[in-house]
Image: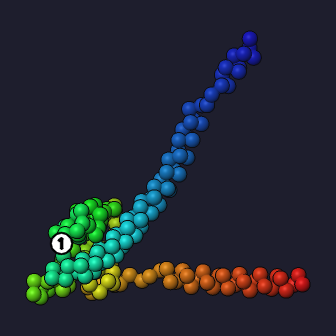
Amino acid sequence: MNQLSVRKSMCGFTLIELLIVVAIILIIAAIAIPNLLRSRIAANEASAVGSIRTLNTAEITYASTYPDVGFVGLSNLGGAGGTAAAAGLIDSVLANGGKSGYVFAVTPANAVNNANTTYSIVGDPASTQTGTRHFYSDQSGVIRYDATSQATANSNPLRPRRRLLLYRESRFACSLCVFVQCRLKRRS
């Protein structure tokens, strides 16, 4: 009977053991959550750059399709398609001016014979939780950014990272090929 009571007292976890486990989980969460927020901001910024590229393409397509109107605002680029008032070149979410934590505005300008010949696109984060950089583009197609305030035509242009990565990948691939060739020569 004495052994039975000892076994009953040994079943389960003590309060201290449970508190230690909870503390470890909280420490891991405290480390992981800021990284999750940073990755979400980076994803929102990448989406904003993609949306600005989409808007640039839509503006060029619209101006080519309706040359007597030229460049237009967001509302004309969205819609069901087929008319100058609703061209259907962008999705309804982007046509409403917001997507992935960013707010977009397209401003057509410089009307010549009632056709707008220039435009500017601005993409700003809806809050500091959704992004940190502000983006700008115009009819040149160059996307610019500013980390502190609304981006303008004088802001820094985005640098394409893809080319740098491809260069690094090609250098790695060349190094790998040389390594493999050396190994094959040693075997023969």
Q: Which residue is mark 1?
A: 84
Closer to us: 94 or 14: 94
Residue type, label 1: Ala
Q: Is residue 124 visible?
A: no
Q: Tag count in the figure? A: 1
Name the outermost residue toward the top. Answer: 1
| Residue 172 against residue 21 in the figure, above or below | below
At a point 71% along the width and 20% down the height, the residue shown is 6
Would you say 115 lies left or right of 156 here?
A: left
Coloring scheme used: rainbow
Give x and y (percent) for residue 17: 59, 36
Would you say 18 lies left or right of 33 here?
A: right
Q: Is residue 57 visible?
A: yes
Splitting the image into 4 quarters, where does residue 118 fall? bottom left
Name the outermost residue toward the right. Answer: 188
Closer to us: 27 or 77: 77
How many C-alpha atoms fall within 10 Å of the one at disc 1: few (<14), some, or many (≥20)?
Answer: some
Q: Could you tell me which secondary element the residue under label 1 belongs to?
A: loop
Would you say 115 lies left or right of 57 here?
A: left
Give x and y (percent) for residue 69: 15, 80
Closer to us: 100 or 35: 100
Give x and y (percent) for residue 159: 42, 83
Splitting the image into 4 quarters, where does residue 21 fall? top right
| Residue 178 against residue 129 in the figure, above or below | below
At a point 67% along the width and 85% down the height, the residue shown is 174
Give x and y (percent) for residue 63: 23, 81
